[in-house]
Amino acid sequence: MSEHKHSQSGKVKKIPVRQCLGCNEHKPKGELLRVVRSPEGEISLDFTGKKSGRGAYVCKSLDCLKKVRKSRRLEHNLECSISAEVYDRMEAELSEEAEV
């Protein structure tokens, strides 16, 4: 289900596609926000997509993050419990990122 993009050399470059846990839509990886559980168990937003750890993807919208919070899909996907403070911090970070 990957999208393809032709590079200048004529080779087809695959664009990785991931599913948002909030709206269940498949989108190119770059359009989604990665939530990562580090090897130490810390949950954080990964705006670069390069942090090490288990990742899950959510659209860059507060609506999707709120859906994920309500359904607890993120906790299931990352195989850990997530406190309200962590969700609040993620919502604040996402709001700040949207303003930039």
Image (cartoon, rainbow, N blue to C red):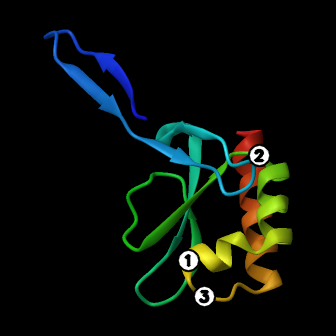
Give whichever of 23, 69 is nearer the camera: 23
Give the residue displayed 39% in from the left and 40% down from the top: 16
Q: For the C terminus, give its image quadrant.
A: top right
Residue beneath label 1, please?
78
Which image quarter: residue 77? bottom right
- Pick whichever of labels 2 and 1 is earlier in the sequence: 2
Q: Secondary structure at mark 1?
A: helix
Residue beneath label 3, please?
80
> How far separated are the C-alphas under marks 3 and 2?
23 Å
Q: Secondary structure at mark 3?
A: loop
Q: Is residue 79 left or right of residue 73?
A: left
Residue beneath label 2, please?
61
Furthest-left residue in this view = 9
Above or below 53: residue 91: above
Give the residue displayed 13% in from the left and 11% down from the top: 9
Give whichever of 48, 100 is nearer the camera: 48
State how many labels appear. 3
User: What's under tag 1, amino acid-wise?
Assistant: Leu
Q: Is residue 27 left or right of residue 23?
A: left
- Pick whichever of labels 3 and 2 is earlier in the sequence: 2
> How far separated are the C-alphas under marks 1 and 3?
6 Å
Give the residue displayed 83% in from the left and 60% down from the top: 67
Above or below 61: residue 81: below
Contact, CB < 8 Å: mark 1 with mark 3? yes
Give the residue displayed 76% in from the left and 71% down from the top: 89
Mark 3 packing: few (<14 Cα in 10 Å), some, or many (20+)? few
Mark 1 packing: few (<14 Cα in 10 Å), some, or many (20+)? some
Q: Secondary structure at mark 2?
A: loop
Furthest-front residue in this view = 1
